[in-house]
Image: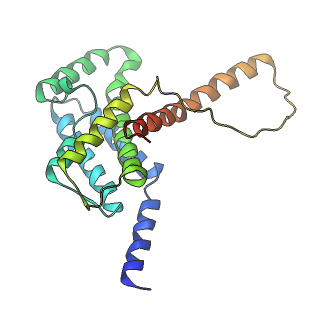
């Protein structure tokens, strides 16, 4: 086996290991960062975490990020006014106030974890299926295009249309009572929500690049 062939196979195996489990681990770390009750610290740690995630994904595709590109992509997801120090303080204060209202206490960690997952998922999708650049380094200009597509995908996630999933299912005997059918349906709908969102997120992201 030639060195080039061996390197290619190693890269393929590395890409295979970048699954939902690995992204899920980063998302959990993002949620943990979002729960830190100290102003500015979650923002700083979150930027470090997202930068590490981006580097991890790029490396597995045999690519590197310039310092400027990493900084652009690692910025917090959301409106531009919430990305600076003042915006981070305002966002932190708003989260803490809402956190006093029972279940809304999970808002900060949930947002941080979800945004980390979305960033990793779409960046990996771009490198695996969309990128046609021949350079091995992602520069600031390319990073801005990626970031713009991610922001647009988040904004249009609900309005983007995708074809419904086709699931083969034969007729089976259903012995459930009506209450059980109702609760089963509600729980199944809740379980399908992440897939419903990610499929639209992927489609909206691809549309930004004319795919």
* Left or right of residue 140, residue 8 in this image: right
Evaluate whether residue 110 shows in this view: no
Residue lying at the far left of the rendered structure? 86
List x then y, in percent, for residue 43.
19, 35
Q: Position of residue 61 (x, y in %)?
A: 35, 61
Numbered-mark total: 0
Where, by quadrant of the figure, is residue 78 drawn? Answer: top left
Residue 50 occupies which quadrant of the picture? top left
- The residue drawn where x is 31% and y is 16% is 98
Instruction: Return the x and y of residue 2 as percentages of the image width and height.
Output: 40, 85
Residue farthest front in this picture: 210
| Residue 135 shown left or right of residue 128 in the figure | left
**At x 16% / y 24%, what residue is drawn?**
87
On-image quarter of the N terminus: bottom left
Residue 86, compared with residue 169, is above or below; it is above
Q: Residue 90 at what x, y percent from top left? A: 18, 20
Q: How is the image coloured?
A: rainbow
* Residue 171 appears in view: yes
Image quadrant where one finds the C terminus: top left
Q: Is residue 80 left or right of residue 127?
A: left
Q: Identify which residue is drawn at 20% across, 27% down.
A: 80
Front-lying residue, 79 or 141: 141
Relative to the observer, which residue lies in front, 98 or 86?
86
* Location of residue 33 by image quarter: top left
Q: Judge by depth and name the residue closer to the eye, 132 or 128.
A: 132
């Amino acid at each position: 086996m030639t060195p080039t062939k061996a390197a290619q196979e190693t890269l393929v195996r590395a890409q295979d290991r970048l699954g939902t489990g690995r992204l899920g681990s980063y998302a959990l770390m993002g949620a943990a960062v979002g729960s830190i009750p100290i102003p500015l610290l979650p923002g700083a740690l979150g930027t470090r975490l997202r930068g590490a995630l981006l580097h991890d994904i790029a490396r597995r595709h045999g690519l590197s990020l310039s310092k400027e590109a990493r900084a652009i992509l690692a910025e917090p997801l959301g409106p531009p006014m919430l990305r600076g120090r003042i915006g981070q303080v305002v966002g932190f204060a708003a989260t803490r106030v809402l956190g006093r209202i029972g279940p809304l206490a999970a808002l900060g960690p949930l947002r941080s974890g979800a945004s980390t997952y979305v960033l990793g998922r779409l960046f990996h999708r771009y490198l695996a299926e969309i990128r046609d650049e021949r350079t091995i380094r992602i520069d600031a200009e390319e990073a801005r295009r990626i970031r713009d597509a991610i922001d647009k995908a988040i904004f249009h996630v609900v309005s983007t249309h995708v074809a419904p999933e086709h699931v083969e299912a034969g007729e089976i005997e259903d012995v459930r009572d009506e209450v059980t059918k109702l609760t089963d349906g509600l729980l199944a709908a809740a379980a399908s929500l992440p897939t419903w969102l990610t499929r639209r997120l992927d489609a909206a992201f691809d549309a930004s690049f004319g795919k």
